[in-house]
Amino acid sequence: MACRLSKEPDVSLRNLFTDHPTTVGETYWQHLAAAWGFSWRLMAASLACLIHALLPFLFVRTGSRAITELHDRMVVNRQRQAAHAAPPAAERRAA
């Protein structure tokens, strides 16, 4: 029988990798793919912004377009999915 000396909550290694993805409705692997996609898009937009800083006639809207697209993917799309998943207000009141 093991004796627990620590009064800290029991945090499993698995939970460290799955807690956050679960809060956004994804598995670990789905979250990994989405986050990698975001990071590549941000790196490309960052490079375009750097070039734009030096040569203002290039990549005039690339950075702002990337931010808008990523915002739509992350926030707006997630809100749409949550709205479709939740039952209509009338059904919630009837239950």
Image: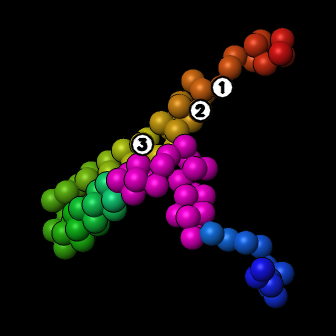
Amino acid type, label 2: Ala
Mark 2, residue position: 82
Task: Give above or below for 31 relative to 85.
Answer: below
| Mark identifier at residue 73 | 3
Q: Which residues are magenta?
A: 13-35
Spatial CA span between label 2 and label 1:
6 Å
Report the residue marked by disc 1. 86
Q: Position of residue 32 (x, y in %)?
A: 39, 57
Residue 8 placement, left or right of 77 = right
- Mark 1 Cα shell of 10 Å, populated few (<14), some (14-19), many (≥20): few
Position above or below: 5 against 55: below
- Residue 42 makes an appearance in the image: no
Say left or right for 50 vs 15. left
**Residue drawn at point x = 59 percent, y = 32 percent:** 82
Neighbor class of circle 3 (other Cα within 10 Å; few <14, some 14-19, many 20+) is: some
What secondary structure is marked by label 1? loop
Question: Residue drawn 63% across and 69% down?
Answer: 12
The quarter in which the C terminus is drawn is top right
The reply to whether residue 56 is in sight is yes
Which circle, 2 or 3, is nearer the viewer?
2
Label 3 element class: helix
Name the kind of residue labelled 3 in the image.
Arg
* Left or right: residue 3 compared with residue 14: right
In the rendered image, the vertical position of residue 91 relative to residue 3, given as above or below = above
Extreme residue in the front direction: 1
Closer to us: 88 or 10: 10
